[in-house]
Image (cartoon, grey):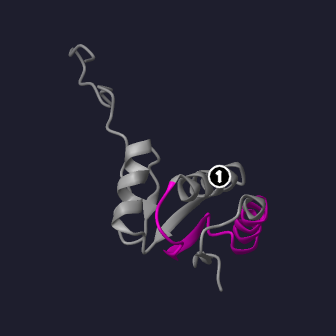
């Protein structure tokens, strides 16, 4: 594995609450080892989407951000994606273009004599 290849963490079955801290540690360790800045979380085997899955993914994303990286989802169930959007958790999905926040009316270049907008 080289520095540009993200590591993959396979999540299977509903994770018990006591497993979550260990999975967060795994994400941080994978970020440190690879240096890629992203850990791909394969969620195809995660089980039926529910708030436990949302909580797990939110905690993994928080741990990754604290370690200077992000998580990216691989093969999320459409219902899980809908649930994540519903609760306002915007996670990057493998194969999708990363969405960026729109500019907030900031004009980057102003011609001499023109007022800034």
In x, y percent, where is residue 47?
Answer: 51, 72
Residue 23 lies in the magenta stretch: yes
Please provide the residue range marked out in magenta: 21-50
Name the residue rendered at 53%, 54% in the picture.
Answer: 54
Residue occupying the far left of the picture: 114
Q: Secondary structure at mark 1?
A: helix
Q: For this rendering, which residue is in front, 21 or 109? A: 21
In x, y percent, where is residue 64?
Answer: 66, 56
Residue occupying the far bottom of the picture: 1
In x, y percent, where is residue 11?
Answer: 60, 74
Res 24 → quadrant? bottom right
Q: For this rendering, which residue is in front, 85 or 36? A: 85
Q: For this rendering, which residue is in front, 58 or 27? A: 58
The quadrant of the image that shows the C terminus is top left
Name the residue rendered at 66%, 66% in the picture.
Answer: 15
Res 98 → quadrant? bottom left
Name the residue rendered at 64%, 49% in the picture.
Answer: 62
The quadrant of the image that shows the N terminus is bottom right
Location of mark 1 (residue)? 59
User: In this rendering, is residue 58 above or below 11?
Assistant: above
């Amino acid at each position: 594995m080289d520095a540009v290849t993200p590591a993959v963490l396979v999540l299977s079955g509903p994770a018990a609450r006591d497993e979550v801290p260990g999975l967060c540690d795994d994400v941080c360790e994978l970020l440190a080892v690879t240096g890629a800045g992203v850990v791909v979380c394969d969620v195809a085997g995660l089980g039926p989407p529910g708030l436990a899955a949302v909580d797990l993914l939110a905690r993994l994303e928080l741990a990754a951000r604290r370690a200077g990286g992000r998580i990216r989802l691989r093969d999320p169930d459409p219902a899980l994606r809908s649930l994540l959007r519903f609760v306002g958790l915007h996670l990057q999905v493998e194969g999708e273009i990363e969405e960026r926040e729109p500019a907030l009316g900031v004009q980057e270049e102003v011609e001499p004599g023109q007022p800034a907008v």
